[in-house]
Amino acid sequence: MAERAPDGWTPVEQGLWEAFRQGGVYDLRAGDADQDDPFGGAAWGPERTVRAEVLSRLLLAGPAAAPGRVASLKLTGIRVTGPLRLAGATIGHYVEVHDCRFEQKILISEAEAGTLRFVSCLIPRLEASRLATSGDLHLARCRIPEGVRLTDARIGTDLLLNQAVLGGDRFGRALSADGMAVSQDFEADRLESRGEVSLRTGRIGGRLSLRGAQLHAVPENHTALNLVRVTVGHTLYLSGSADGGWYGSQTYYGSGYGEIPPAGAPSTPFRAHGRVRLSDGRFEAACLLSDAEFRLGPDDELALRRIQTPELRFTCRFPDGGTVSLSRARVGNLVDAPGSWPQGKQLGLTGFTYECLRPAVPFTVQQRIAWLEGSSVDFQPESYEQLAAALRRDGADDDAREVLYAKQRRRRQTLPLPARIWGRIQDVTVGYGFRPGRAALWLLLAWALGSIYFATHQLQPLKADERPHWDPVLYALGQLLPVVDLGQQGWNPGGADQWVASGLVIVGWILATTVAAGATRMLQRG
């Protein structure tokens, strides 16, 4: 290869040729913060302008490295004109670009590269579908008004979009990364998007972090985040981000990654303005939806159907209402709070299973029952059974019985009128077997009233020539317990006395059958 820049290159481009051979940074900044801001309005003239075809020539057919050097493309403060066309190329050189302006889009679809770093750059659009890198792809702090396409891309190590600002394409998508695979972490902390962020069927080997991200749907596409069928090898973070690690920081990694900020420390919550879809996702360590705001419209939903994760942390807010669906989801620990869930029949819990309840703040059993009854489906017996089983595993047997009692009362509302009446009798008398003390109280009350009545209304004997000993207390008890002979069967009630005696018999049988039903239920629970 020639050691001199090709004819027709400008002096600026010739300087870049030599910097590439030396592996040094080609820095054309003026030294003034306002003048050097790639997102500002200051004009960048020919003295800091390079054509995109020059960059292509260097990366695909550039000069040999100077002796003892490694050729690489390192740019700072440069204006690039024309589209950068590298689609299908094999890029063998290291690329790092800071604080640059690209006037037209970058096309690197189906290219192969090592590490590509674009930091704090203005890029109209990035087309990188089926890109394959052996190292990182960095787009941190970049502004990409027409969005990024990374469909079916393969990233060898990390993908960074921290503090990037993305606009939408003509379909309302800010990030199209369906089918993308990232071997290690995908960080998009404090990402700002205007359009859908889509990673459907994506595979992330490490963490997927959107801490402090601000995601906005657009009128032509009402979805803010789409992670349907995504697989994350560690943890999904849809959570807040402590401000102290970012403001004034010179790094685009922030600080304190994965740590909980101190109490009261200023932070920025994760916010999604539009639909969020996590259905069928697999999160191998945890799914954290904490310090998050979901601003859902009347027809929008936070969909967590059929997700699987060892821990779901759900401590978020719904300022504008909306629906949450956890149908058929399977989690280990459920970490939540009473105020985390939407109100007014906006919750889908059909088939939702969890092993343990680990509330972030006190969560009473009555609040748990209200949580179940806030489901969008009228009556789901399996939801009550699931909650009772989780409480029993935690040793809260009394709370589990409260849940099963609430289940019976809720079930009664779905029955026909005769069954509702019978259910009401069971509820009032013995609480469906979950209030056994009530039966004793009713028996004592009926016994006392019966004893008082018959103390003032002595009965006539059945046989005129026989007169057994009269005991009104034992007679009343014998009517309540008709299967027990207390020696008071030789009396003949008539008129009102017969009605009172019959009433005691009926009350006794009702209490006996309801107690038997309650005992059966307790044996079934055992």
Image (cartoon, grey):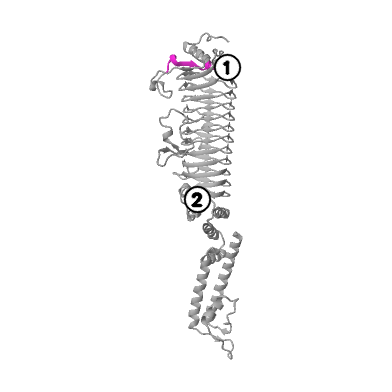
Question: Residue 518 vs residue 453: left or right?
Answer: right
Q: Indicate yes or no whether the magenta region holds residue 487.
A: no
Seen in the picture, residue 277 relative to 89 is either above or below; the reply is below
Q: Is residue 295 visible?
A: no
- Quadrant assignment, res 412: bottom right
Provide residue 395's location: percent of width, then percent of height: 54, 55
The residue that appears at 58% across and 82% down in the rendered structure is: 487
State which region is magenta.
Answer: 44-56
Provide residue 446's location: percent of width, then percent of height: 51, 74
- Give the quarter of the figure containing the N terminus: top right
Question: Residue 129 vs residue 292: left or right?
Answer: right
In this orientation, which residue lies closer to the viewer: 379 or 371? 371
Q: Which mark is residue 343?
A: none
Q: Which residue is mark 1?
A: 60
Q: Looking at the image, tell me whether mark 1 or mark 2 is earlier in sequence order.
A: 1
Q: Which residue is mark 2?
A: 345
Magenta span dominant secondary structure: helix
- Quadrant assignment, res 502: bottom right
Q: Amino acid at mark 1?
A: Leu
Q: Residues within 10 Å of mark 1 (few under 14, many from 20)?
A: some
Provide residue 74's location: percent of width, then percent of height: 50, 19
